[in-house]
């Protein structure tokens, strides 16, 4: 009897969340302690009954710390934020040669290989061709090149189109890899953009 009651309780709480007017009267004698209150944004999403919105509210920010591949000293931190139409990436990358460098989200959040080949190819959930964001077909993981100044520092502010952050869908980039390349992406060569070797690799982690 007691076990059955405990099993039913989560369903009762969910119902209460969907119907704010319904009185929630936990039994003062044997009900377990009330769960910690969810963040306001999650409650708002739950009230709409829209599961997608709720997931977005839970994790709309992520970050990645870049680690240099063998023989390189590239470093940096990147922040990922959900925006209209995709995910904005900002941050700074240091230790580069001046000029343009290919920059992509790759399919595996695995930087363990010395050359970061473990990160796999460009993140491509829609099975499209490699290309340039905003100019027709491109991989979801494609981005414009990042540009390093004479000191080897690139200030990143770029848009990824066709990806999401923390919603658990097929386009979610949380848990994927991010790669900085030695050469510029030509936005044309298949399937890599001919961006050369991998200078640094990071794993996109929810915040
Ligand atoms: Cu790449
Ligand atoms: Zn690509």
Image (cartoon, rainbow, N blue to C red):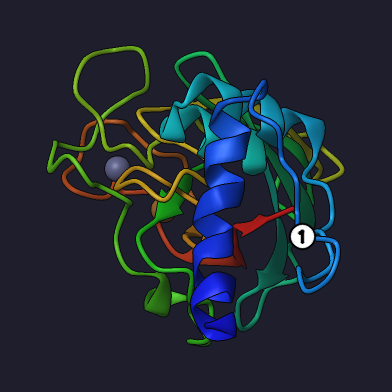
Say which quarter of the image contains residue 83: top right
Query: Do we see residue 21 in this rendering?
Result: yes
Tell how many labels.
1
Residue 122, percent from left and from top: 32, 52
Residue 201, percent from left and from top: 58, 66
Residue 54, percent from left and from top: 55, 34
Query: Do we see residue 181 in this rendering?
Result: no
Q: Residue at x 29, y 61 (%)?
A: 121
Specify whether 202 is left or right of 102. right
Q: Residue at x 29, y 12 (%)?
A: 135
Q: Nearer the viewer, residue 103 or 10?
A: 10
**Residue under label 1:** 27
Say which quarter of the image contains residue 46: top right
Specify whether 139 is left or right of 133. left
Q: Residue at x 58, y 62 (%)?
A: 9
* As drawn, 156 above or below 28: above
Q: Nearer the viewer, residue 28 or 33?
A: 28
Q: Assess mark 1: CB under 8 A from ligand 1?
A: no
Specify whether 181 is left or right of 33. left
Report crowding for label 1: few under 14, some 14 to 19, many 20 or more residues within 10 A (C-alpha): few
Q: Nearer the viewer, residue 21 or 190?
A: 21
Q: Residue at x 64, y 28 (%)?
A: 22
* As drawn, 21 above or below 33: above
Residue 177, percent from left and from top: 49, 61
Q: Quadrant of ligand 2?
A: top left
Q: Secondary structure at mark 1?
A: loop
Specify whether 189 is left or right of 23. left
């Amino acid at each position: 009897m007691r076990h059955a009651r405990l099993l039913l309780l989560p369903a009762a709480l969910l119902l209460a969340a969907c119907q704010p007017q319904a009185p929630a009267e936990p039994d003062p004698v044997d009900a377990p302690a009330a769960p910690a209150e969810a963040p306001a944004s999650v409650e708002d999403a739950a009230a709409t009954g829209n599961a997608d919105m709720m997931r977005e509210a839970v994790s709309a920010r992520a970050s990645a710390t870049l680690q240099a591949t063998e023989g390189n000293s590239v470093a940096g931190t990147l922040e990922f934020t959900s925006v209209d139409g995709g995910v904005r990436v900002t941050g700074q990358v240091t230790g580069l040669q001046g000029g343009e460098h290919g920059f992509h989200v790759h399919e595996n959040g695995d930087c363990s290989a010395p050359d970061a080949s473990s990160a796999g190819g460009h993140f491509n959930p829609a099975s499209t061709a490699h290309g340039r964001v905003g100019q027709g077909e491109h991989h979801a993981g494609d981005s414009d090149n990042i540009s390093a100044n004479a000191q080897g520092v690139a200030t990143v502010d770029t848009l990824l189109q066709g990806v999401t952050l923390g919603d658990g869908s097929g386009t979610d980039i949380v848990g994927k890899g991010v790669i900085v390349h030695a050469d510029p992406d030509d936005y044309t060569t298949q399937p890599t953009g001919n961006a050369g070797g991998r200078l640094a690799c990071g794993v996109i982690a929810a915040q």
